[in-house]
Amino acid sequence: MSVIVTRVVVLVVATTVLWLNNETQVAEASDGTGDDEVIRINKHTIRCILVLGDSSVDPGNNNRLPTTTKSNFIPYGIDFFHGRPSGRFCNGRLATDYLAEAFGYTDSVRAFLDPAITKKDLLHGVSFASAGSGYDELTANLSSVIPMWKQLEYLRHYKIHLRNLVGTQEAEEIIRNNTLFVVSAGTNDFLLNYYSDSTRSKQYSIEQYMNYLISRMRTVIKTMRSLGARKVVVVGVPPLGCMPIVRTLRNVEKCDIESNKLAFRFSSKIRRESKMLGRWTLFLDINTIILNAIQNPKRYGFVETLKGCCGSGTYEYGEMCKGMSICSDRTKYVFWDAVHPSQNMYKIIADSALELLLKHTF
């Protein structure tokens, strides 16, 4: 693949899942470490969601960073509560926000670095994610955002806050039995890093780099496990070739085939690794979810599938969208800007993930 992409914040679409079984299910969680337990799951099981990743799940942590990778300005957030830009790279809510609402405790997931965060937010979930980040530490460094190791450090800090709120024993109970962990990253490692900066492409072939990313992902998930995670959703990467900015840079009318092949190969590796880690880790195939919406727009209520709503819809994202005109009906667009999905697309991802989860036994 010969894509050379200028540095751009790339979305790995966020995931969302929910335990809404009306009947209690009994699952035996084992990862081969000898730490086996019986987990009873019903619609009241999940009280908290903790999120790591990139712009697909960053609700505004980058607002507090000295980086240009931000979206805390209009027209971003035009469909968020009170039409307020929050730092989400979307016109409204992310998939993880819909997840939080479905749990019934809050209608959005707050950024861990938000100074206005409340005790209720800490009890029911926060996001440590940072737009522009990835599994490769270099990816985050290129944009001066929060790398995965730092997000994991914030998770450790979160556990201290939680213990101070509810006590050590209850805090551990919440983390082990009542918390859903979501990891959504990987896309920036290719578009922001491998195909934009020469460092990694000189070190690794594309196949070697994918394997390197999988090893980093494995480390992240195992660290989460050591911190108490027992329900982890790992999100694949979206169809990169369908992003408006990639289509523009590749000068193709429809989705770029080679870029989509890369996304499919890497998502397949994530799927295999998730299975190897054990049943406590669930893979979400957003590649297929988004492709289905693009290929069958009427089924999902979309009209425009290849352009974003902001500006011309072909290259604008982040700062380039600032003050730009937007489309008249945002509900008809798969993409909000030239990189990130619209709020309606996130809702579709949420619904698909929910259906997947209800078939899974942790």
Image: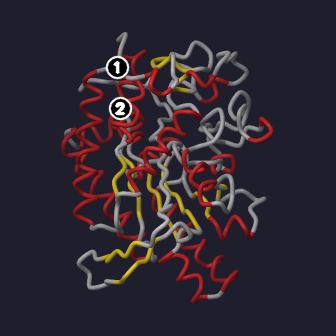
Q: Quadrant of the C terminus?
A: bottom left
Instruction: Residue type at mark 1: give it.
Output: Cys
Residue 30 percent location from the top left of the image: 28, 77
In this rendering, position of residue 137 left or right of residue 344? left
Q: Marks 1 and 2: CB-CB under 8 Å?
A: yes
Task: Give me the residue at 66% from left, 71% from top.
Answer: 123
Residue 267 is drawn in which quadrant? top left
Q: CA distance from mark 1 to mark 2?
A: 8 Å
Residue at the disc numbered 2: 239
Residue at the disc numbered 1: 255
Q: Nearer the viewer, residue 337 or 173?
A: 173
In this rendering, position of residue 85 left or right of residue 189? right
Task: Give me the residue at 55% from left, 22% from top.
Answer: 333
Residue 12 is marked as none
Picture mark count:
2
Task: Give me the residue at 26% from left, 37% from top.
Answer: 264
Residue 100 percent location from the top left of the image: 61, 56
Count neighbours of disc 2 (C-alpha within 10 A) and say few if under 14, some if 14 to 19, many if 20 or more: many
Instruction: Residue type at mark 2: give it.
Output: Pro
Q: Nearer the viewer, residue 224 or 15?
A: 15
Q: Quadrant of the N terminus?
A: top left
Residue 347 percent location from the top left of the image: 54, 40
Count neighbours of disc 1 (C-alpha within 10 A) and say few if under 14, some if 14 to 19, many if 20 or more: many
Q: How is the image coloured?
A: secondary structure
Q: Name the element at disc 2.
A: loop
Residue 236 percent location from the top left of the image: 35, 46
Task: Give me the residue at 74% from left, 29% from top.
Answer: 74
Q: Name the element at disc 1.
A: loop
In the figure, 101 relative to 204: above or below? below
Residue 70 is drawn in which quadrant? top right
